[in-house]
Amino acid sequence: MDSAPSSMTRLLHPDVAPQPGGTPLTTPIYQTSTYELPRTAEAARIAASVAPGAFYTRYGSPNAREAEAMLADLDGAEAALLVGSGMAAISAALLSTVAGGPGGGLGGGEVLAQRSHYTASLTLLQEMLPGFGVPVRLVAQEDLAAEVRPETRVVYVETPSNPTMTLTDLRAVRAAAPDAILIADNTFATPYNTRPLELGVDLVVQSATKYLNGHSDVTAGVVTGSAALVAKAWETARVLGPVCHPFEAWLLARGLKTFPLRMARHNANGLAVAEFLAGHPAVRAVHHPGLPSHPQHDLAVRQMRGYGAMLAFTVADADAAARVMRSTRLCRNAVSLGGSESLITHPASLVFAHQGAASGVDPAMLRLSVGLEEVEDIVADLAEALSTVDR
Ligand code: PLP
């Protein structure tokens, strides 16, 4: 072959170390918490190294290493850190950038972030970091670039954000904050649709629980970026201990092989369902970046290769939303997203538990994670459920 295979093709051919008896096509599951060490000074060198793969499973494992190599390659990053959940990835990325250093990590500076973030990220930003003395300023997502100040040291963004599908202009934020550490949650878009490191982001965080694994059977998270920043995130995770265990890492490496196939189908299904809902008389609004009616559709065209399968739609009122929720059959009522099956949730009821009525989430809004089913079946299910709603 004259040209190197693409990163999507490389996902199908991970590096698998030879084993006694042969070289398997998949890495065996290293179901051990610890490894026998050489009885030489080499043991101390392994213990002191960053992310040793065969030392102690809280530090890493051959299965985590394999998934990390695939995830770094997919993002075009120097390095990746795999941990036990998306929140663990976000916590490791944020805590490792705000901590330490003479005079405190931020040296009198601040973290700038959005008012709309995944609910647990918002708790970390709004309550926990300030509790540790870290100043955090939350601003309207669309105004983020304009809100950068000289004291802004870390910018934390999420695009599209959960659940409103609002976008952050990554290039504009980078240009406005050239010296800040820019961290982006790319869970909704995935590297298939948005490539944050190529747009100037320093650290990408993702819940691998969602599209990366894709089968609703793993909880995991990943941080990607430069080797230096990922090593700092690893050090934080080593201390806090949110391990991605070998079997979970193995399942993730397995799920990643079909990631590009699944994303192509998610993109097509997501857009088709958004278009169906946009034309339905019982639907007041549809929030999906692929629709020309999305207020930031131009930015979506510039920043996204496809528009994903997450969308929110608004019906007449909270009562109508409850009736739709009760009536879908194929679209299951469950939190999470990015799995093979379509899921529907009522964000206002779910975030109220953590943020109260101040969350501002419209009680007439429903969120859909469009799955991999035949799109006609998804549309038929939604049409049936919407028929229960008075126009
Ligand atoms: N980021 C986003 C955008 C999410 O939607 C979620 C979970 O839904 C997370 C992060 C957290 O991921 P996890 O549940 O794997 O901790």
Image (tube, grey):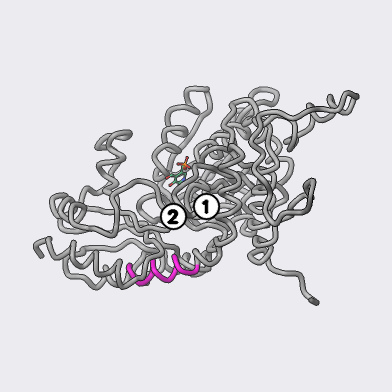
The residue singled out by tag 2 in the image is 338
Provide residue 159's location: percent of width, then percent of height.
47, 54
Q: Residue furthest front?
A: 21
Evaluate if marks 2 and 1 touch, with contact meaning CB atoms under 8 Å apart.
yes
Q: Is mark 2 within 8 Å of ligand 1?
A: no
Residue drawn where x is 25% and y is 41% of the image: 349
Provide residue 185's location: percent of width, then percent of height.
52, 48
Foreground pick, 274 / 68: 68
Quarter, ligand 1: top left
The answer to if 277 sits in the magenta stretch is no
Query: Which of the two discs, 2 and 1, sits closer to the camera?
Result: 1
Q: Mark 2 Cα within 10 Å, few/some/many (few <14, many 20+)? A: many
Q: Mark 1 Cα within 10 Å, few/some/many (few <14, many 20+)? A: many
Residue 225 visible within the image: no
Residue drawn where x is 80% and y is 77% of the image: 2
Find numbered disc 1 in the image and state the secondary structure of the residue it sits on: loop
The residue singled out by tag 1 in the image is 213
What amino acid type should be assigned to the residue bearing mark 2? Gly
| Lateral position of residue 47 relative to residue 175, left or right | right
Residue drawn where x is 24% and y is 69% of the image: 380
Q: State which region is magenta.
A: 264-273
Foreground pick, 149 / 379: 379
